[in-house]
């Protein structure tokens, strides 16, 4: 049973990554200015319906991920290690409007495209 569930999950992730995924253009802002910070590249965020795929060129340990709807209500608020290998989040609400990623002294945000 677990193998079937895992296999279905892998198929879903690969379809999101390769076929139907839309990208979110992430903006960067520093909470506190410091020269030569380790996070020069914004994480990449792709989405398809209820799945978010997050990856980065460097590792962001214990990054806080916040997804909000158009009314500002929090749909997802959690901690995730972002790496080169894609990390998948399941956010069931289809009314996602924005995503914020807090990585130490860095903050990144992006807006989902409206239908």
Image (cartoon, helix red, strand yellow):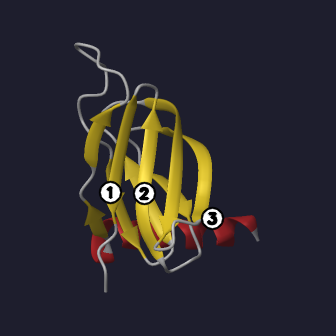
Whether tag 3 and tag 2 are in contact, CB under 8 A, the answer is no
Furthest residue toward right: 1
Task: Sort mark 2 into few (<14), some (14-19) or many (20+) by Cα contacts within 10 Å.
Answer: many
Q: Residue at x 76, y 71 (%)?
A: 1
Q: Residue at x 38, y 68 (%)?
A: 47
User: In the displayed structure, would residue 45 be above or below residue 34?
Assistant: below
User: In the displayed structure, would residue 45 be above or below residue 63?
Assistant: below
Q: Quadrant of residue 32?
A: top left
Frontmost of labels 3 and 2 is 2
Q: Residue at x 31, y 77 (%)?
A: 20
User: In the displayed structure, would residue 17 be above or below residue 105?
Assistant: below
Which of the pair 85/77 is nearer the observer?
77
Question: Which quarter of the rendering shows the C terminus?
Answer: bottom left
Q: Residue at x 51, y 74 (%)?
A: 50
Which of the pair 26/23 is nearer the observer?
26
Task: Sort mark 1 into few (<14), some (14-19) or many (20+) by Cα contacts within 10 Å.
Answer: some
Separation of residues labelled 3 and 2 (CA atoms) = 27 Å
Whether tag 1 and tag 3 are in contact, CB under 8 A, the answer is no
Whether tag 1 and tag 2 are in contact, CB under 8 A, the answer is yes
Q: Quadrant of residue 41?
A: top left
Of pointers 1 and 3, the one earlier in the residue sequence: 3
The x and y percentages for residue 21 are: 32, 71
- Position of 76 compared to 100: left or right? right
Of pointers 1 and 2, the one earlier in the residue sequence: 2
Which residue was labeled with disc 3?
6
Which residue was labeled with disc 1?
110
């Amino acid at each position: 049973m677990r193998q079937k569930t895992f296999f279905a999950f892998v198929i879903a992730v690969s379809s999101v990554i390769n076929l139907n995924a839309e990208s979110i253009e992430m903006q960067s802002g520093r909470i506190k200015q410091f020269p030569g910070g380790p996070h020069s590249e914004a994480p990449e965020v792709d989405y398809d319906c209820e799945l978010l795929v997050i990856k980065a060129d460097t590792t962001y340990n214990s990054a806080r991920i916040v997804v909000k709807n158009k009314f500002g209500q929090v749909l997802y608020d959690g901690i995730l290690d972002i790496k080169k290998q894609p990390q998948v989040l399941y956010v069931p609400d289809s009314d996602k409007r924005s995503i914020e990623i807090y990585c130490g002294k860095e903050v990144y945000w992006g807006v989902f495209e409206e239908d």
